[in-house]
Amino acid sequence: MEKKEIKRTCNYVAGGLLIYTWIGFLAVIVEMIIRAASISIRVDDVEEENRLIDSVFNTMLEKEAWSSIVGVVLGIVILAMFFYKKVSRKDIFLSVNAMTPKRFFQILCVFMGTQLIFGVGGEWMEKGVNLFGYSMMQSIESASSISTTVSMFLYASLFGPIAEELVYRGFVLRSFMKLGKIPAIVLSSVLFGIMHGNIPQSVFACAVGVVFGYVTVEYSIGWSILLHIINNFVFGDLLGFLMKNLSEQTQSTLNWGIMGVFFLAGAVIVWRKREKIREYVVANRIAEKRYRYMFTAILVVVFVVIHLAMGIDMIEPLK
């Protein structure tokens, strides 16, 4: 009965995530169809029509995010109905402990320290696939690029972080809380990381997902949303914008310097609190077989395979 209940819960949650994923895809596809139809009506020449459609599609995928914004907003509404009987609004916005400036700064240091995982991990992954004649630079550049349009900025710095936290620390994590704090944090973090469909970025997202999950469970989802916005806006778009006119060498030095400072600060904080962390893990751990039940639920596997395939598809032959 335990095995069936765990798998039932995981399949239900993963099913909701698959619906959310397809809503996002559908929003983009619908915009493509509308734009293609508009061009077809206005242009008579077939070659010119195809050229304009290709140009519009490339611009949409690389520079515009209006359909993605519509997709996440619509997706949240649909998920709210999907999880209506499973997760209440009170559960999602539950506030447990009071956050202090000192605690927030410590969490921020640990959170930002994980940036080094993406930086170093990305370089080693690139070197690893290079040995087989492939490159992951498209994935790395996509994950670290800054917004170039208003829609991309709004999506990356505001709508995306809020939506992702509501989905993965709201509906998903709260659905898994019946399994325990640690499994809820771990499983929601893994699904959050895999969701990005970008292998190097997924490693980083899994790591920060643990921090987001802990903050949500022990404080509130409002703080995880704030952390997510700080990461995407301040250390993503804003920092990138301020440094865009600097040389590549200077940008690299500053980026590695910032990541290094946060990593050292985060490492010191984790070391000093290692006993409390160990006690927290021991107090909330569950039998290993339960993790096996969770990660072998059929719809969880389907979700992972789909997004992993998207990540693999971004790996290109080395030029």
Image (cartoon, rainbow, N blue to C red):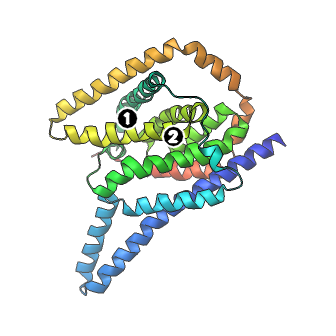
> Which numbered dot is residue 233?
none
Q: Quadrant of residue 242?
A: top left
Instruction: Give the residue drawn at x 44%, y 39%.
Output: 226
Tag 1: Cα neighbours inside 10 Å, few (<14), some, or many (≥20)?
many
Residue 197 showing in the rendered view: no
89 vs 171, nearest the viewer? 89
Looking at the rendered structure, the kind of residue marked 1 is: Gly
Tag 2: Cα neighbours inside 10 Å, few (<14), some, or many (≥20)?
some
Q: Quadrant of the N terminus?
A: top right
Question: Does residue 169 appear to the left or right of 115 in the view shown?
Answer: right
Compared to residue 95, the image places residue 110 above or below, namely above
> Which numbered dot is residue 222?
2
Q: Position of residue 258 (x, y in %)?
A: 30, 26
Q: Cβ–Cβ below 8 Å for labels 2 and 1?
A: no
Question: Does residue 41 appear to the left or right of 275 in the view shown?
Answer: left
Instruction: Give the residue drawn at x 55%, y 49%.
Output: 167
Compared to residue 171, the image places residue 240 above or below, namely above
Q: Position of residue 135 (x, y in %)?
A: 34, 43
Q: How many marks?
A: 2
The local secondary structure at tag 1 comes to helix
**Sequence order check: which comes first, mark 2 or mark 1?**
1
Q: Position of residue 26 (x, y in %)?
A: 48, 66
Circle 1 is placed at which residue position?
A: 122
Looking at the rendered structure, the kind of residue marked 2 is: Gly
Instruction: Give the residue drawn at x 34%, y 60%.
Output: 61
Residue 64 showing in the rendered view: yes
